[in-house]
């Protein structure tokens, strides 16, 4: 294994999309940002230098950060932000992971433009558990706002209302032609007869997406940097935060084939309905006369497409890559996730939309939780996060009259190596909605999911404890639930939140604190000397 050095200069860059220009925050002037390439077991050092006016931090989404929580990145959770003019070296080792992950800013809404791929190659001489593709391509799905993204969320926080939706979705930074602006989209060149691996990342702030390629089936081989049993599909469903590797064989003779990404949202809320388009382009037919085959993605409320896709996901569970699902459970938790309404005298309706887990709207601390934990600083958080929802603040209830939530900086405490079963239940408060929940510091197994209320008596009997999919971000179905299991084998403070950025902002977040173990390699290491100060 080796040490890989990267330098991320965070700078403003004037960028044109949809026929209008604006300065955006970027890494090294690029949107999407540079791809970080490493191998399993490598150590990665990324020097992040802040040249913009915002405080910032970068998160390495899905990297387990075993004992190195100081390098995880969520602002005020594991670190104070890197202030303008300052820098910080993120230093971590990639242990037991290979596949596609990604990095993104983890403060304010800067991740709209500050994001990029992490490609973790298997150890040298270890092959993929599928035929080696001819070539690999990163495909980042995102959203584009014509206006300034920070202004969008600040306006919403002032009014108490929902923020504006994006103006377009993007594929590798480009929406494709949109009405009134005949711009070029992204083109992926292919050779007839060859197989390609696409490393697809959903970096959008607020929307789950469908992804499809005209005339070509996709073979899913990996999600969230864990191998799955390969299966074929026309369409993939991918939530913000998730990654999906697919194989695609260029089995046709030539021509251009549309690549499309559009929203999946089965709630009656406003979404950006634009379909982002790109093209798969066979070499040897690169003339303007090339036949073009179009496609269309499912409608935004195509729940069955999403359900079928999710059901097909299974861990590879081979001898080399076993699914180590915890069987004995130390903590059986039930978290409701959803929206709420709190009073706000200065807001438009005298109230503001909030979000919560078990009716707690998380309040960000002034210094990072990890520092407070490591240095025993009192008064920053409490360890009384409720393991069950309060009654009668109930899920999928039509009878709720009290939409108000409590506020607090509450953590749930786990001993080293404790096992957790966590049922995430959409409350359907205000409206049922999908919630892609992301857990930092761990992979978990999705052992079950269903619609309606989770039934603690009957549902666990149907859990898949053999080959459930292993991931770091899970879509809680709207009006339904999902059950995950993980082992707390990583000491530190680990954020869990909805990866719809608007829900995180509204408070759909909490954190687990995992104490050190007693063994020699079971403690959090001390912070590095350049660790940012608040
Ligand atoms: Cu991808 Cu806490 O984030």
Image: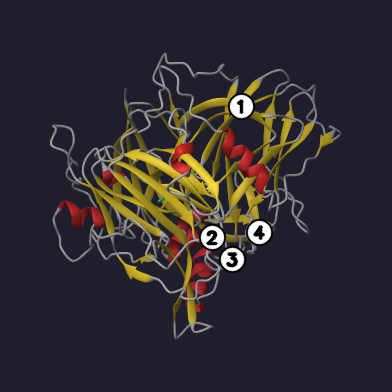
Q: Residue at x 71, y 23 (%)?
A: 250
Label 3 CA crowd tier, 10 Å (few <14, some 14–19, many 20+): some
Dot 2: element = strand
Q: Which residue is mark 1?
A: 231
Nearer-N-terminus badge (3/4): 3
In the drawing, what numbered circle is on residue 508? Answer: none
Residue with the most extreme top position: 125
Nearer-N-terminus badge (4/2): 2
Q: Where does the image place residue 356, in percent across and percent down from the top left? A: 42, 64
Is 463 situated left or right of 68 in this image?
right
Q: Is residue 342 above or below residue 96?
A: below
Q: Which residue is mark 2?
A: 23
Dot 1: element = strand
Q: Where does the image place residue 3, in percent across and percent down from the top left? A: 31, 29
Q: Which residue is mark 4?
A: 272
Q: Marks 4 and 2, how far apart in space? A: 22 Å
Question: On the rendered image, what quadrant is the C terminus found in?
Answer: bottom left
Quadrant of the rendered structure where residue 430 is? bottom right
Q: Marks 1 and 4, how far apart in space? A: 30 Å
Nearer-N-terminus badge (1/4): 1
In this rendered view, identify the residue nearer to me: 280 or 510: 510
């Amino acid at each position: 294994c080796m040490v890989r050095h990267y330098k991320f200069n965070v700078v403003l860059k004037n960028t044109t999309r949809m026929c209008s220009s604006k300065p955006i925050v970027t890494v090294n002037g690029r949107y999407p940002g540079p791809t970080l390439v490493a191998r399993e077991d490598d150590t990665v050092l990324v020097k992040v230098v802040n040249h913009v006016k915002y405080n910032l931090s970068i998160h390495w989404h899905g990297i387990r950060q075993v004992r190195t929580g100081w390098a995880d990145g969520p602002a005020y959770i594991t670190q104070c932000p890197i202030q303008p003019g300052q820098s910080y070296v993120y230093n971590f080792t990639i242990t037991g992971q290979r596949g596609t992950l990604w990095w993104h800013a983890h403060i304010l809404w800067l991740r709209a433009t500050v994001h990029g791929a992490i490609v973790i190659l298997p150890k040298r001489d270890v092959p993929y558990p599928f035929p080696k593709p001819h070539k690999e391509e990163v495909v980042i799905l995102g959203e584009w706002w014509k206006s300034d993204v920070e202004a969008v969320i600040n306006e919403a926080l002032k009014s108490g209302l929902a923020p504006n939706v994006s103006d377009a979705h993007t594929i590798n930074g480009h929406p494709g032609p949109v009405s009134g602006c005949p711009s070029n989209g992204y083109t992926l060149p292919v050779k007839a007869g060859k197989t390609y691996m696409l490393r697809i990342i959903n970096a959008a702030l607020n929307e789950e997406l469908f992804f499809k390629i005209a005339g070509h089936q996709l073979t899913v081989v990996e999600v969230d940097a864990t191998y799955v049993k390969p299966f074929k599909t026309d369409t993939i469903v991918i939530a913000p935060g998730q990654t999906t590797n697919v194989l695609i064989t260029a089995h046709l003779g030539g021509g251009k084939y549309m690549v499309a990404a559009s929203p999946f949202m089965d709630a009656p809320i406003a979404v950006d309905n634009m379909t982002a388009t790109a093209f798969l382009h066979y070499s040897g037919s690169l003339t303007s006369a090339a036949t073009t085959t179009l496609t269309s993605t499912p409608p935004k409320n195509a729940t069955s497409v999403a359900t079928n896709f999710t059901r097909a996901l299974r861990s590879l569970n081979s001898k080399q890559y076993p699914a180590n699902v915890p069987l004995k459970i130390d903590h059986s938790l039930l978290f409701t996730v959803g929206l709420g309404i709190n009073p706000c005298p200065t807001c438009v309706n005298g109230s503001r939309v909030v979000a919560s887990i078990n009716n707690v709207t998380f309040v960000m601390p002034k210094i990072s939780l990890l520092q407070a934990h490591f240095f025993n600083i009192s008064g920053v958080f409490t360890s009384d996060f409720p393991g069950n929802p309060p009654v009668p603040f109930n899920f999928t209830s039509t009878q709720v009259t009290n939409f108000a939530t409590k506020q607090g900086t509450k953590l749930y405490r786990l001993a080293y190596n404790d096992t957790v079963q966590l049922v995430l239940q959409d409350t359907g408060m205000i409206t049922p909605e999908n919630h892609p929940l992301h857990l930092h510091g761990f992979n978990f197994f999705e052992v079950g999911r269903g619609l309606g209320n989770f039934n603690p008596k009957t549902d666990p009997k149907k859990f898949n404890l053999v080959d459930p999919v292993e991931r770091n971000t899970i879509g809680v179905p709207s009006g339904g639930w999902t059950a995950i299991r993980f082992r707390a084998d990583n000491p530190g403070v680990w954020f869990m939140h909805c990866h719809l950025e608007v829900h995180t902002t509204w408070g759909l977040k909490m954190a687990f604190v995992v104490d050190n173990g007693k063994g020699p390699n079971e403690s959090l290491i001390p912070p590095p000397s350049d660790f940012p100060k608040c």
